[in-house]
Image: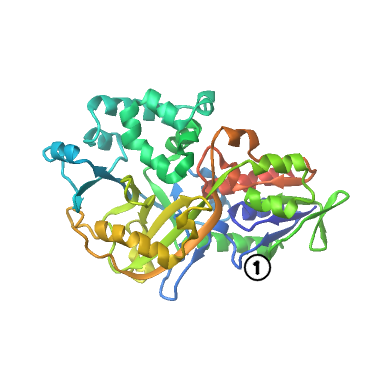
């Protein structure tokens, strides 16, 4: 068969790999000049390794991508256990109580902030912002979620209602509320409990990375595809797909089948001539947030040890900070430190409408306040965080809203149009998007044909 794959990210490349093994004639259409989608990397002339535009790592249980790497002879994946933590805002009352209970990490003006690690049961037991009863409830529910199979219960209620009911209101407010607010904004109260089940189920202490960056794996797959005679069209944007009898026409060329890995709203635009109106109407009801990733290069790190920092202080308008060089050696980036600042926003959000310089001006006062902690972990008073370079990336339709409406309208592999298939990252539900699920979707799509 002659098959068109729309999108050259890991989903499309994986589908192309497995379909080429079946001796199909494959063409991959990719709008960007390089393959890889959201996992594609960039580098400066002084860096030895590529860096992804958004935060990327693997979990120890990411079997799909690990198995693919093994199958294609790629052995440059390694695992480490970097420090993860959360930055909390502490009220004056709580601060006074905590002075003798634990070390306070820092102070910003008249507000008190503290950094805590919550990566293990032991960390939870030491966590001073919860009572022993709250800690016990939290531990039991987390253990249940980690061991539980997917249950109908998780889709019958929201994460907030589930966690308040079973963990208690205080656990919700301390551990979860700000995480959901920062990630989902106005939709936070609508997110299904299945999302939190998947988040707890999937997370592992050890995180994986690829020597040379994820682009190294992508380049390896690309070479395999070229050797298998797969036609890779880079820098090629498709504007329209037409139907012809049992085939599909893309820029005058006829294909027997199509696999779209494009975000659902983009697919609707280019395939509206061939998809039934009722089907388009259903897919159009899926809501999305966009992602913003600001990558900062600096001489000094913002944190000395922590790689993954959830920002749970409501007044700090940042979802998370990820110090790449506390996970991957800075020698690979010209001995400079690399920091990701990440957000999810709506299309009308002021942050989405800002340019790079505006975003930097907006968040710099906050970065200056929490930058360069001392060896003991204390946050200094207003030490200036200096950039040597920065890059801004905006990704449309990066996060579907996993609410009850999503369950009714989510895309599936099979469409009403014969031989037209979907394999979009919108279909990773209930899990967060990631390279492992991109590979899984690509492999499953290949099985359909």
Q: Position of residue 147 (x, y in %)?
A: 43, 28
As drawn, 246 above or below 335: above
Q: Position of residue 204 (x, y in %)?
A: 40, 41
Total tally of numbered discs in the picture: 1
Element assignment for label 1: loop
Q: Residue at x 47, y 42 (%)?
A: 186
**108 on left or right of 420:** left
Q: Residue at x 17, y 53 (%)?
A: 376
Q: Residue at x 14, y 36 (%)?
A: 97
Q: Residue at x 61, y 62 (%)?
A: 222
As drawn, 392 above or below 432: below
Q: Residue furthest left?
A: 100
Q: Residue furthest right?
A: 245
Q: Position of residue 108 (x, y in %)?
A: 21, 53
Badge 1 is on which residue?
235
**13 on left or right of 289:** right
Quadrant placement of the C terminus: top right
Res. 21 in view: no
Determine which quarter of the picture holds residue 130: top left
Tell which of 448 and 248 is nearer to you.
Answer: 248
Q: Position of residue 283 (x, y in %)?
A: 67, 42
């Amino acid at each position: 068969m002659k098959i068109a794959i729309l999108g050259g990210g890991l989903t499309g490349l994986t589908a192309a790999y497995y379909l080429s093994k079946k001796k199909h004639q494959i063409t991959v259409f990719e709008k960007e000049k390089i393959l890889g989608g959201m996992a594609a990397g960039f580098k400066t002339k002084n860096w030895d390794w590529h860096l992804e535009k958004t935060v990327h790592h693997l979990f120890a249980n990411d079997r799909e991508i690990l198995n693919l790497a093994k199958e294609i002879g790629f052995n440059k994946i390694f695992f480490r256990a970097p420090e993860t933590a959360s930055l909390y805002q502490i009220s004056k009352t709580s601060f006074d109580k905590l002075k003798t209970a634990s070390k306070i990490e820092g102070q910003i003006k008249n507000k008190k902030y503290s950094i805590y690690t919550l990566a293990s049961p032991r960390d939870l037991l030491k966590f001073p912002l919860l009572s022993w009863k709250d800690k016990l409830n939290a531990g039991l529910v987390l253990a249940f979620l980690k061991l539980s199979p997917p249950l109908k219960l998780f889709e019958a209620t929201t994460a907030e209602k589930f966690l308040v009911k079973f963990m208690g209101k205080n656990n919700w407010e301390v551990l979860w509320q700000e995480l959901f607010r920062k990630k989902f904004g106005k939709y936070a109260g609508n997110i299904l409990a299945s999302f939190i089940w998947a988040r707890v189920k999937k997370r592992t202490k050890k995180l994986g990375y690829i020597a040379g960056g994820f682009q190294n794996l992508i380049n390896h797959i690309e070479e395999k595809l070229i050797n298998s005679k797969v036609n890779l069209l880079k820098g090629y944007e498709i504007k329209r797909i037409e139907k012809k009898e049992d085939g599909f026409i893309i820029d005058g060329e006829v294909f027997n089948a199509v696999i779209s890995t494009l975000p659902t709203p983009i697919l609707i635009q280019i395939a509206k001539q061939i998809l039934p109106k009722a089907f388009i109407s259903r897919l159009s009801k899926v809501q999305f947030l966009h992602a913003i990733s600001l990558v900062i290069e600096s001489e000094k790190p913002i944190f000395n040890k922590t790689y993954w920092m959830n920002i749970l202080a409501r007044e700090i308008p940042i979802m998370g900070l990820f110090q790449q060089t506390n996970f991957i050696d800075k020698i690979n980036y010209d001995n400079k430190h690399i920091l990701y600042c990440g957000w999810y926003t709506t299309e009308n959000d002021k942050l989405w409408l800002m340019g790079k310089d505006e975003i930097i001006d907006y968040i710099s006062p906050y970065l200056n306040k929490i930058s360069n902690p001392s060896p003991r972990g204390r946050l200094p008073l207003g030490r200036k965080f200096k950039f040597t370079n920065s890059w801004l990336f905006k990704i449309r339709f990066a996060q579907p809203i996993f609410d009850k409406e999503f369950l009714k309208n989510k895309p599936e592999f099979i469409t009403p149009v014969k031989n037209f298939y979907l394999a979009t990252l919108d279909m990773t539900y209930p899990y967060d998007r990631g390279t492992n699920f991109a590979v899984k979707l690509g492999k499953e799509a290949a099985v359909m044909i």
